[in-house]
Amino acid sequence: MLREETAASPDRRAAALAGLKAYQQAPRARKKRPAPTRFKVGRARLRDYGGSGRNVIFVPSLINPPFILDLAPQNSLLRWCSEQGLHPYLLDWGEPSPADRAMDVTAHVERILLPLIARFDEPPLLVGYCLGGTLALSAAAAGGVAGLALIATPWHFTGFGDGRAAIDGLWQAAKPACEAMGLVPMEVLQTGFWRLDPARTISKYEAFGRMEPGSPAWNGFIALEDWANAGAPLPYAAGRQLFEDFVGDDLTGKGGWIVAGRTVDPHALPCPAVEFVSLSDRIVPKESAADLTDRRDLGAGHVGMIVGGRSKVQLWEPLADWLKHA
């Protein structure tokens, strides 16, 4: 990809490689201790961020680590919510092993998310981010939830347009090895993310090489890239269902996804629901949104709406206000 994007400019190639080397060699602070566990189901943990007020379970994607919602002490949606009259919890999906190979996306809802919801004395609120929103929506459809907020959530996978063919090509190439391992490694998924915007993938490392070491921008880049380049593998069945049934056949958008014995219909939820959609999202196109009646369109990107400079104004504050009044 680097060769393709910089074929006409050896200087750009050298700059990108220099930026990549600087990123790889940059010192990292000691990893912070995760929030304490309130409940656990199998390998999954529900981490307690404290606070008073309504209980809110934040459901991250199965792809990439959950700490994007708690990226840094000064840039944490979860810690901020705990100071706003809410009691947030973060679902940490844990790390699957080959023994989990048969656990598909549906099973993550039925065997992890729904049992955790049932541990609360009062129905909690759910907030789902990215693919985590897809799972949260299906859990809300099963009942037992006080309200649902979706953030950059894919539902109509036909909205990925021409990108579906590229994703299918990536999956078909990786499928035999993934089936043999019983897992879909993060490297397979990350390759797909890079291909969504190869020019930006190269240019961001060029820009990093020019940043002042130790500056806020430099530290912010490292924190975000470490998140983007990390993550547990998916169980093979979850990868197969995601790539073939969701992206390939649009199972959710066609109304064919059955969870806990019920067909999941985003327009017939038994609880209040709101959807925050990025109009400039390169990872989850706006055309793939569930298009709930209460839909809030934002200008920030897929990650920027969570940790960007204007995230508090654009997303955090309206989200917290909705959660307190749902």
Image: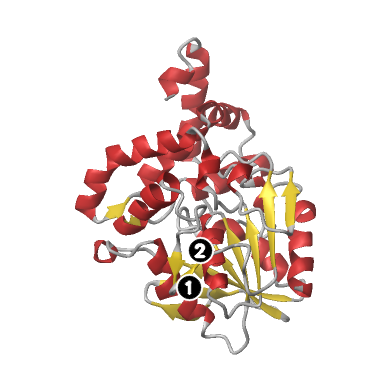
Residue 257 lies left or right of residue 140; in this view the side is: left
Q: Which residue lies at the image location 50% right of the left edge and 58% below the top edge? A: 255
Q: State the image coordinates of residue 110 (x, y, percent, origin top left).
A: 42, 73
Q: Which residue is mark 1?
A: 113
Q: State the image coordinates of residue 114 (x, y, percent, origin top left).
A: 48, 76
Instruction: Name the residue at the top extreme.
Output: 8
**Disc 1 secondary structure class:** helix
User: Which badge, 1 or 2, comes first in the chain's sequence?
Assistant: 1
Residue placed most toward the observer, 108 or 223: 108
Q: Amino acid at mark 2?
A: Leu
Q: Which residue lies at the image location 58% right of the left edge and 32% below the top edge? A: 208
Residue 148 lies left or right of residue 260; in this view the side is: right
Q: Amino acid at mark 1?
A: Leu
Residue 304 lies left or right of residue 24; in this view the side is: right
Q: State the image coordinates of residue 177 (x, y, percent, origin top left).
A: 23, 45
Q: Which part of the image, by quadrant, shows the C terminus?
A: bottom right
Label 2 Cα crowd, 10 Å radius (few <14 / some 14-19 / many 20+) = many
Residue placed most toward the observer, 23 or 285: 285
Q: Which residue is mark 2?
A: 135
Q: Which part of the image, by quadrant, shows the N terminus?
A: top left
Asked if 23 appears above or below 53 in the picture, the reply is above
**Disc 2 secondary structure class:** helix
Label 1 Cα crowd, 10 Å radius (few <14 / some 14-19 / many 20+) = many
* Quadrant in the picture for residue 319: bottom right
Q: State the image coordinates of residue 84 (x, y, percent, origin top left).
A: 77, 71
Measure the alpha-carbon separation of dots 1 and 2.
8 Å
